């Protein structure tokens, strides 16, 4: 405490002087780091918004370039990786999309968004032997009455493997004309249309598939991916929830 004399009152006034901090440098450094972190977070948020907009505007190449700025500084940025996988998928770069998703699932094995995106790749039948096996098993489980439709789905899946979604769409539409109650044809049509950047058409095909079989978890997953691409987040979440409900009941 410092004592000051008041000339008017002739008495001593006690004034408390704040102690001088001994860690001014550390305080300033901490404040600077906070500002840097805040700037980095706002920068990443702005870049993510720009990348999502570019993908919604059907420009996956620009989306990837924008995401590179984020991933250069933060290679483990989960949201950026997931969006990068979606951009690769929109450009029919299936193997590149799979690599990104595998990297995400290595770090976060139960990440629901990565698993949803993996579901979209899965039904394209374009990647691994495991996928081929699942497609064959699904086809072999068809009833004899729908064997011809199942065979056409096999042809369509083969076209998707060869990066020919337009050919797949042609095959599936002809099949649906002959077999309008075949849910798998509509589901695979939804994937093919999505691969052709026709998200609205994909939504219609997947919705029709669910009208024929409303207990297929994969179709709900796929529809969720499409709705998310269209910007309908609430409806996408509802579709994902339905898929999770079916999976939990069936034990898959």
Image: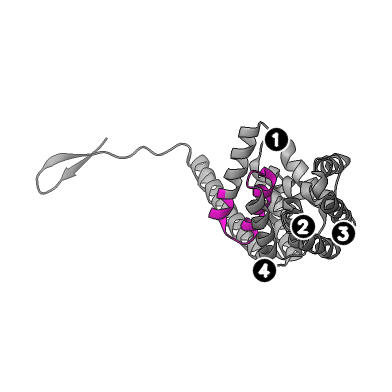
Q: Main secondary structure of the magenta part?
A: helix
Q: Residue at x 78, y 46 (%)?
A: 122
Q: Is residue 232 magenta?
A: yes
Mark 4 — residue?
A: 57
Q: Residue at x 67, y 44 (%)?
A: 216
Percent across and percent down for residue 152 are: 85, 55
For the residues bearing labels 1 and 4, Cβ distance under 8 angstroms:
no
**In screen coordinates, is 165 left or right of 222?**
right
What's the distance in space between the residues labelled 4 and 2, CA to CA?
Answer: 35 Å
What's the distance in space between the residues labelled 4 and 3, CA to CA?
Answer: 22 Å
Q: Is residue 138 magenta?
A: no
**In screen coordinates, is 196 left or right of 20?**
right
Could you say which disc has been placed on residue 131 in the image? none
**Residue in the foreground of this view, choosing between 84 and 199:** 199
Between marks 2 and 1 in the image, the one whose residue lies nearer the viewer:
2
Q: Earlier in the sequence, mark 1 or mark 4?
A: 4
For the residues bearing labels 3 and 2, Cβ distance under 8 angstroms:
no
Between marks 3 and 2 in the image, the one whose residue lies nearer the viewer:
2
Percent across and percent down for residue 23 are: 48, 37
What crowding class fits label 1: few (fewer than 14 Cα within 10 Å), some (14-19), or many (20 or more)? few
For the residues bearing labels 4 and 2, Cβ distance under 8 angstroms:
no
Could you say which disc has been placed on residue 109 in the image? 1
Between marks 4 and 2 in the image, the one whose residue lies nearer the viewer:
2
Quadrant of the drawing holding the N terminus: top left
Mark 2 — residue?
A: 179
What's the distance in space between the residues labelled 3 and 1, CA to CA?
Answer: 28 Å
């Amino acid at each position: 405490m410092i004592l000051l004399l008041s000339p008017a009152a002739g008495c001593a006034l006690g004034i408390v002087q704040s102690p001088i901090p001994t860690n001014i440098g550390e305080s300033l450094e901490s404040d600077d780091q906070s500002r840097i972190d805040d700037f980095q977070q706002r920068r990443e948020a702005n870049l993510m918004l720009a990348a999502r907009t570019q993908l919604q505007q059907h420009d996956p190449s620009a989306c990837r370039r924008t995401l590179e700025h984020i991933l250069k500084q933060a290679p483990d940025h989960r949201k950026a990786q997931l969006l990068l996988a979606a951009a690769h998928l929109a450009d029919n770069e299936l193997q590149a999309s799979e690599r990104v998703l595998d990297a995400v699932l290595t770090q976060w094995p139960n990440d629901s968004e990565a698993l949803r995106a993996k579901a979209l790749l899965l039904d394209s039948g374009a990647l691994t032997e495991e996928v081929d096996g699942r497609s064959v098993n699904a086809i072999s489980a068809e009833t004899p009455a729908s064997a011809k439709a199942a065979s056409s789905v096999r042809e369509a899946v083969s076209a998707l493997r060869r990066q020919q979604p337009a050919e797949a769409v042609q095959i599936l539409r002809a099949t649906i004309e002959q077999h309008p109650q075949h849910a798998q044809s509509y589901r695979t049509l939804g994937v093919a249309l999505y691969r052709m950047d026709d998200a609205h058409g994909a939504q219609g095909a997947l919705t029709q598939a669910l009208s024929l079989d409303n207990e297929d978890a994969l179709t709900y997953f796929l529809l969720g991916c499409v709705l998310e691409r269209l910007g309908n987040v609430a409806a996408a979440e509802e579709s994902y929830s339905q898929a999770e409900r079916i999976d939990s009941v069936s034990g898959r």
